[in-house]
Image (cartoon, grey):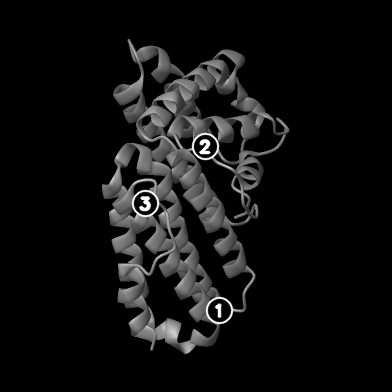
Amino acid sequence: MGAYTLKNNPAGVLLEKMMAVKASDHHLPMTTIWASVFKCDVADTREIVGGLVMLMELIKDAKAAVRAYAPGDPKLFLAPIDRVEMFLTTHHLASQLGSYVGFLDASTMTALEITDHILQLNFLDEHPGATKDVRDFIVTLDNILEECLASDLSQELKDLFVMNLEALRQALLRFRVGGEAVLQSALDGVTGSIVRNKDSIKNEYEIAEEFVSKTAGFMGKIEDLMNRGQNIVALASPVMNVLLPFFR
């Protein structure tokens, strides 16, 4: 999956994805559209399905964010999110985009832009500076993913590292609504995954060492975000202290 810039409230992510969908050729099948949006091969069913699951999770998060942050009656800000949800839950992957682009009409997209703007202002008020931090984290994560996919690791280990890095990505995207508990759950899950697969990693450790270290270092910075607010520094982390001894 290629690198791309994301806003850090769920409505912003939905807006960017739906803008990419709407700008696509309306004669193309939805599988081709989603492959383009998620930066993957059209035959990569797992990536496409994973991307759609991510969007459905963002729908839930966006609704929760509207109820928590939007001023006045939330119905105005929920309406475009409901419209996107209807699109996602009713479309067929083999059908052309033109059959569904009506869900993303001008009024829906404008309303979604307003919702994004309202939530973004509230996020910035509550967490000044954090938006850039999370965005920078996601760019770093994308770079590690690209390096992993281009490496000489076996497909089994590539799948393992990609799965774990994607779990961290989703946690960062959901941090705004789910808070530190979302990040901690992801850190615990990735740590457990690496420990459970330590034998497979050891078999390719000459190559895998770089990605174990980078993953652990990245997780350490997430811990620092949780522990120190906006003070993100490159310190040795508890995650590194737990993971790296398994491979010595």
Q: CA distance from mark 3 to mark 2?
A: 18 Å
Specify the label residue 154 is tagged with.
1
Q: Which residue is mark 3?
A: 225
> What's the residue type where badge 1 is placed?
Ser
Q: CA distance from mark 1 to mark 2?
A: 33 Å
SS at mark 1 in the image? loop
Q: Is residue 18 left or right of residue 214?
A: right
The N terminus lies in which quarter of the figure?
bottom right
Specify the label residue 213 is tagged with.
none
At which x and y percent is residue 34? 60, 43
In front: label 3 or label 2 = 3
Residue 216 drawn above or below residue 197: above
Q: CA distance from mark 3 to mark 1?
A: 32 Å
Using the rendered image of the protein, determine whether residue 45 is visible from the camera's viewpoint.
no
SS at mark 3 in the image? helix
In front: label 1 or label 2 = 2
Specify the label residue 7 is tagged with.
2
Q: Earlier in the sequence, mark 3 or mark 1?
A: 1
Q: Residue at x 62, y 35 (%)?
A: 95
Q: Residues within 10 Å of mark 1 (few under 14, many from 20)?
A: some
- Viewer-proximal residue, 8 or 240? 240
